[in-house]
Amino acid sequence: MNFALIGNQNSGKTTLFNQLTGSNQHVGNFPGVTVDKKEGTIIGHSDCTLVDLPGIYSLSPYTNEEIVTRDYLLSGEVDCIINILDATNIERNLYLTLQLIELQIPMVLAINMMDEMKTNGGTIKINRFKEMIGVDCVPISAAKNEGISDLVNCVIQVAKQKKQPARLDFCSGAVHRCIHGISTMIEDHAQEIHMPARFAASKLIEGDKPLEKQLKLTDNEIDLIEHSVKEMERECDMDREAAMADMRYTFIEKLCKDTVIRAHESKEYLRSVKIDAVLTSKYFAIPSFILIMAAVFYLTFGPVGTFLSDGFAIIIEYIVTFISQFLLDYGLNDVVYSLLVDGVFAGVSSVLSFMPVIVVLFFFLSILEDSGYMARVAFIMDKPLRKLGLSGKSFVPMLIGFGCSVPAIMSTRTLSSNRDRIMTILLTPFMSCTAKVPIYAVFSLAFFPNHAAEVMILLYTTGILVGIIVAYIMKSTLYTGAPIPFVMEMPNYRLPSPKSVLLLMWEKAKDFITRAFTIIFLGSIIIWFLQNFDLHLNQVADSADSILALIGQSISFIFKPLGFGDWRAATALISGFTAKESVVSSLAVLMQTTSENLPAALGTMFTPISAYAFLLFTLLYSPCIAAIAAAKREMGIKYTLIMIIMQCSIAWIVAFIFYQSATLIL
């Protein structure tokens, strides 16, 4: 049997999903879209699959999440809906519930956080509540694992009995006449697409254009529907959506008045108000955020992350050395040995050594997310980002981009609209990732030894400024529409769930390892081949005679106006597509020197002006193959190609303007 878990954001949905499935879960995409599809097998019931649908507030087709959720619920694959409600915020949660009831799919209400409500002197009369709403209800506390077994038993029983919600007729007056009149008119159309007529009628009244096309209504039927809606609006003296919302909230108010005993303000709420007086205040919000994120990045890319990464690198190096020695003792063919050791092992191991850093980063970010702080960050940054055509939620992925573009691109799934998601992905690579730091360090040491810190700060600032300019251009050209209206809830600050944090870390680690042994594995083999063979497929002793060098020579003319037309510089930039760190190692190999002596050797290829132009190009040009793969997964091949071309073009233009201007001035 298939169960769908649905509810508002911050209702405890993820916690309940983890309690029901444990680690028996996997993450994918809904067919054709890049919205997370998290599935799991319910513990103790191997024949029961649970699908965790995106957190939404209604079934209106305004965002990808709402469209995906509605399409999945109407697909006929769902045996029972588990609608989770936050007992402390029951009125707002019930708005979605009333829409779900209209779908006439078997359903159970999981009323969450009952422990918190009772602690604060409130409760819900469950039996009376169930009687009035016509749906089975189970009180639970997902965080404390209370009531979970009762919920599972109830859900399975309702699914087996195919027990539909009672047909509530909570409308009256003009709205009542409008709904029932349109329901009768479109009943045959609704039956053809296996949709309840009342649900279809409600959506049409709300102005659901996609559903209008789906029902294949005639022009005459559309005119009659619009006439009915106009009559309803005139009688109710409010617009169509307000009239439908008023109808639902009138019923919700009556339901809560009869069944809910109000809790007094909780300790959690009062504590949250006090914390927010500092963390979201006019003067301290931004400084507090900077301090918190500085601490996160310091720990991630400083003592904690570096310690784990170095330790992991030692383990990987030991394994690679052991296997390399074994292959040598075995007498493996030299070419195959080079492929495995210099190609596969070197490429994959260099990327795998970054896995602890990414896991640690997501550990801290998941703590901030679970605690409720990240919701505040989106709120704080919404106003400045809206001027760039983005919403506050776009800030978090771009912030993560300073660490690594891969998790930054992956985290855009939290954004509500496809427009915001694509814009954010296109802008994220302008935030300089840590993989570029070795390039900055080597060139700063070689050409700006007394101003290395200033050069680093200037490069990071340049990336941000270029991102802002590109955002303005995209807002005025490609994405002229406004960002999705930013509606969000400020949840109370809570202690993060250790289980949720650990599961997220495992999920990200698994995803990273999968990429390392697929995309990066293949990329490493290709680079090794190009660097070790000539056009006649003879193995070369000097990489200057390789196919990679030939490619570098063929495109080096592109970089002459930027001051670094040497084929070795072009070749190093090509190798940077696999991993930005490899730009430095490639230059060392191609210049036949060690990493320690590389700064001195670079003086024979670059001047200070061309060196800085090279740094600008590496700052802005296309991200690594892992980030490109992540972008393709999120937004498809078309927009990924646009991203690559756009970034390389912008990098060339910025480096060209700098080099030519600096040459003229100096």
Image (tube, rainbow, N blue to C red):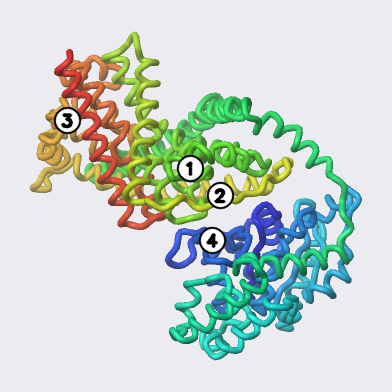
Do the CB atoms of the residues marked 4 and 3 lie less than 8 Å apart? no
Q: Is residue 46 visible?
A: no
Give the foreground label among 1 and 4.
1
Quadrant of residue 402 within the rendered picture: top left
Residue type highlighted by circle 3: Arg
Do the CB atoms of the residues marked 3 and 2 lie less than 8 Å apart? no
Give the residue at mark 2. 486
Name the spot of residue 579 as percent of width and height, x first. 33, 38
Give the residue at mark 1. 386
Give the Cα separation between the discs numbered 1 and 2. Answer: 10 Å
Give the residue at mark 3. 568
| SS under mark 3 | helix
Which label's residue is closer to the chain start, 2 or 4? 4
Give the Cα separation between the discs numbered 4 and 3. Answer: 47 Å
Do the CB atoms of the residues marked 1 and 2 lie less than 8 Å apart? yes
Residue type highlighted by circle 1: Arg
